[in-house]
Amino acid sequence: MMRRKNVTKRPLPKHIAIVLDGNGRWAKKRGLPRTAGHQRGAQNLERIAVFASQLGIGVMSVYAFSTENWQRPQAEVDYLMKMPKLFEDEYEEAFRASDIKVVFSGRRDRLSKENIDLLKRVEEESKDRQGMVLNVCLDYGGRDEIVRAIDTLKNHEEPIDEATLGAALDTGALPPVDLLIRPGGEQRISNFMLWQAAYAELVFMKTPWPAFSKRHLLKAVANYQKRNRRFGGLKGRA
Ligand code: FPP
């Protein structure tokens, strides 16, 4: 049995990144439309974000819509693009109560005017909160983010180093990813947090995201805590 206090007495990852995968398969298995999986996935995002903040996690990044997800059937894309509104109407209150600051990463130039305004509004309303940062990645791709960052530096006079490029990313103000969790059974990164997850510990789980519980999060963090992070050095090696 995974106990919360066993996890919280050891050093926690500062930044957890989660690929919200398996919504479609979760729904299909229950004879429901894929969109029902996305809806349940969004509800679960609220629950897990609040729990992560209670544990003392500093930042939680979630992959909600990738730069490649536009290729899905139009009806599914339309449904997913209504998610930010649901997010604001249904979940914002819980985030406020938990002092969670919400930020968004990803491109803003392909979203609707309503969504662009909504993202700005949610960020603005939560900007002074002191609790966990929830970084929702929407029309996000790791490569796209790096290319956009390089573009913003094109008139930079000094040689570009890692700190300069890192700060120009959407996540510029956030610490590197310590733990990357992918539920849903696939074992790949899929263009998520390519720069930020350079030294992240990877945890892959079979459970699809809508069924991912607090217990799964504790299990992933406990798994992380058992690992020996060397960052390319020899620390702790026999
Ligand atoms: C991947 O599962 C999931 C997505 C493409 C969407 C995830 C989005 C949410 C859970 C809601 C996010 C909330 C906001 C605020 C935008 P999949 O459909 O690829 O699952 P499958 O591999 O089983 O088909």
Image (cartoon, helix red, strand yellow):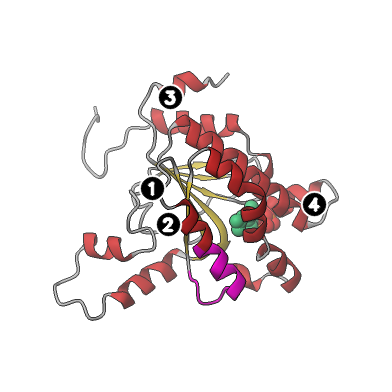
Q: Gap in Å between the C-alphas at discs 3 and 4?
A: 36 Å
Task: Assess whether residue 54 is covered by the magenta stretch.
Answer: no
Q: Which badge, 1 or 2, is on the more N-terminal residue?
A: 1
Q: Which badge, 3 or 2, is on the more N-terminal residue?
A: 3
Q: Nearer the viewer, residue 96 or 177?
A: 96
Q: Which badge, 3 or 1, is on the more N-terminal residue?
A: 3
Three-letter amino acid code at the position of disc 2:
Met
Q: Which badge, 3 or 4, is on the more N-terminal residue?
A: 3
Q: Which mark is residue 28?
A: 4
Residue 80 appears in which quarter of the rendering? bottom right
Task: Name the residue tied to disc 3.
Answer: 8
Q: Which badge, 4 or 1, is on the more N-terminal residue?
A: 4
Q: Position of residue 206 (x, y in %)?
A: 62, 41
Q: Nearer the viewer, residue 92 or 63?
A: 92
Three-letter amino acid code at the position of disc 3:
Thr
Q: Which mark is residue 177?
A: 1
Q: Position of residue 213 (x, y in %)?
A: 63, 34
Query: Which residues are drawn in magenta?
Result: 107-120
Q: Position of residue 92 (x, y in %)?
A: 59, 49
Label 3 element class? helix
162 left or right of 205? left
Q: Which badge, 4 or 2, is on the more N-terminal residue?
A: 4
Label 1 element class? loop
Task: Name the residue tied to disc 2.
Answer: 193
Q: Are dots 1 and 2 in contact, CB under 8 Å? A: yes
Q: Residue furthest left?
A: 158
